[in-house]
Image (cartoon, grey):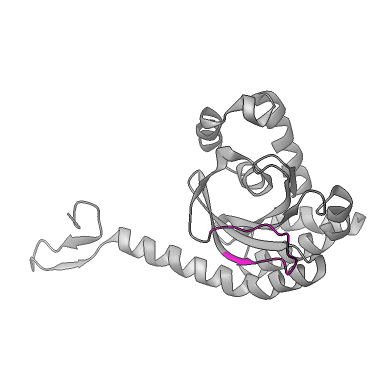
Amino acid sequence: TLAEFHFVEKDPITRRYRLGLQLLHLADARARQVDLAAIARPYMEQLNDYTLETVVLYIVHGVEATAIACIESPQELRQTVEIGRPGPLSELGAKNKVLLAYLSPRAVAAVFADIQWARVNRTPGQLREELARIREQGLARSFGERVPEAASMAAPLWDRRGLVGALAIAGPAARWTAAAMDRAEVALREAAAEISRQLGGRPDWLETQAAALRSA
């Protein structure tokens, strides 16, 4: 079974087993997560101190996003997330949209096929236009889109191989308003850019963030 799924492979000469490529891929993916979480932690703490809202670090795998680290808001009414539970990008929300904006056309088509369009209250054409704006701006926002009465803002994260995840700030919509997001936007952009830079991230996206920061 392990050989069938490429976790081990059999040497045709010695007849002995050795580690397979799939296991090496998993080890590399785990190392990328550890690097990401370690690098992102101090920036997450800064955002949490600045906004007093919940800050979450997500990784993207296929058409799902998984929270791997979270610093909750110190306020009694706050947004919470479940660490380690994958969620489909088709649920939308800021972090899902900012990830979806940079996926391949094939992956986007797969996500679109699973979206409940009546629930998200938009057409495929409207969402494609929104994703194009997100790519231009390097940032996404959401108000009650995935969770009623909740709001979030997110930026993508890049390592040397490409899109790795997203950094999001989430809170109650009554408090985490568009005006509050405006005040925190520069801080989120700076944090995402610096994390991506340390991971060896995508130069063109870093330049997009730099341009946005210059005009802020």
Q: Residue 72 lies in magenta, yes or no?
A: yes
The correct choice, above or below, for 192 with respect to 141 in the image is below
**Residue drawn at 14 percent across, 64 percent down:** 11
- Residue 72: quarter of image: bottom right
Residue that extends furthest to the right in the rendered view of this protein: 215
- In this picture, residue 60 sits left or right of residue 210: left
| Quadrant in which the C terminus is drawn | bottom right
**Residue drawn at 24 percent across, 52 percent down:** 5
- In this picture, residue 129 sits left or right of residue 164: right
Residue that extends furthest to the front in the rendered view of this protein: 76
- In this picture, residue 5 sits left or right of residue 141: left
User: Residue 98: x and y, percent?
Assistant: 67, 46
The correct choice, above or below, for 133 with respect to 212 in the image is above
**Residue drawn at 69 percent across, 26 percent down:** 122
The number of callouts visible is 0
The span shown in magenta is 69-82
